[in-house]
Image (cartoon, helix red, strand yellow):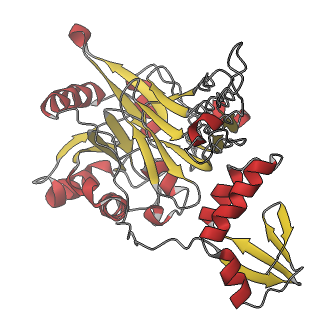
Amino acid sequence: MFYDYARIYVKGGDGGNGMVAFRREKYVPDGGPSGGDGGKGGDVVFKADEGLRTLVDFRYKRHYKADKGEHGRSKGMNGARGDDLLVRVPVGTVIKNAESKEIIADLISHEQEYAVAKGGRGGRGNTRFATSNNKAPEFAENGDPGEDRWLEMELKLLADVGLLGFPNVGKSTIISRVSAAKPKIANYHFTTIDPNLGVVRMEEGKSFVLVDIPGLVEGASEGIGLGHRFLRHVERTRLLLHVLDIAGSEGRDPCEDFVVINNELEQYNPGLKTRKQIIVANKMDIPGANDNLKKLREEFGNSYEIYPVSAVTGDGLRELMYRTAAMLEEIPVTLTPVEEEELRVVKVEIEENYFVNNIDGVWEITGPMIERMLIKTNLGNEAAVKRFLLILRKMGLDKTLRQKGAKDGDTVRIGKLEFDFMD
């Protein structure tokens, strides 16, 4: 089974905690602080691997976490850095933030790497806090937590040529004829529900990769008929073979089919409008095909090359493949990262230090800055808690509480830390 979409959770390693330690050497009765810093947490790193073809591995494992950094040690020794977690993905994988849909990375070349979740910074040991007023600090910092988020991964196949067209026009039969691919073939719509890749080998060692893109329908650019799943594979092909049922065996007009599919391509990605195409007039072995071929040439013969073929008998396929190979030599191989569909508006806002709310008689203190400070504070260390409370006072928290009506004995809560307010 071909898998071209996955949703996974990634988390960088937490930073190690700084250590509280003091020198205890012979003949040094009043040794100073010697606690080392914690090590940085490992990153979750995605690496493109041209040997992978699908995202099937991510169907069975959805959580990826890097190693934590080691805690600081005595004698001023810092903790070791956590190991990075290397995750291999197929070339052509686009990585998005699952919540915001922002494109994070687009891995388009072999061994290209990107850190999708960075490890937390290690906490500082008590050596870092020594000052002239406090020569023996009895506290250290905790490490920062690693980044974590849910990601969406989309695989956009890196094929040279894409076969596209309405369902049941003969694309699967063509790829089975010209390559070693063995797609499922039957006389009903959407026989192909996953892209099929085939290598077309020409003379003198030349070859190219052909992808059979599942049948598109009107409204595909809006997601109808799994349109977005199919259309994303068109974006990185250099040349398109637009297959038409020239006999109209499905009761449709092949000329109208050609216009409809091209409109869907343009609506999905305006850049596809300029992608080179060859029109493949398939099913020439069915009565009525010649009349439609004449009409097709009258309407589009001046703008596109048209090759009449029969996938069933094989007629015309050899000439079509040679012309395809010749055109590919004229089209440069350029893999450009996927652009975001629309510009993001970045607002510069001043971050508030904290927010104060009274909930059921308890003063709740929240805010990104104050919550980060709390994470870095070892609540089991009295000196560290005192330092944290001193910082809050310098930030004016006691004054703010007093202005909002806090009284002696009221409970103040910051995360898991609770204490009584003293005016």
Task: Tell me if residue 161 comes above or below residue 250 in the rendering.
Answer: above
| Residue 214 in sight from this viewpoint | no
Residue 221 placement: quadrant: bottom left
Residue shown at 66% from the left, 28% from the top: 72
| Residue 25 in sight from this viewpoint | yes
Q: Nearer the viewer, residue 3 or 219?
A: 3
Left/right of residue 52 with respect to residue 34 in the rendered view: left
Rendering coords of residue 245 (x, y %): 38, 50
Left/right of residue 145 with respect to residue 298 in the rendered view: right
Residue shown at 77% from the left, 91% from the top: 405
Residue shown at 58% from the left, 55% from the top: 98
Screen quadrant of the C terminus: bottom right
Task: Tell me if residue 81 comes above or below residue 152 in the rendering.
Answer: above
Q: Residue furthest top?
A: 204
Rendering coords of residue 230 (x, y %): 48, 49
Rendering coords of residue 97 (x, y %): 54, 53
Residue 239 placement: quadrant: top left
Rendering coords of residue 338 (x, y %): 35, 48
Q: Nearer the viewer, residue 225 or 24?
A: 24
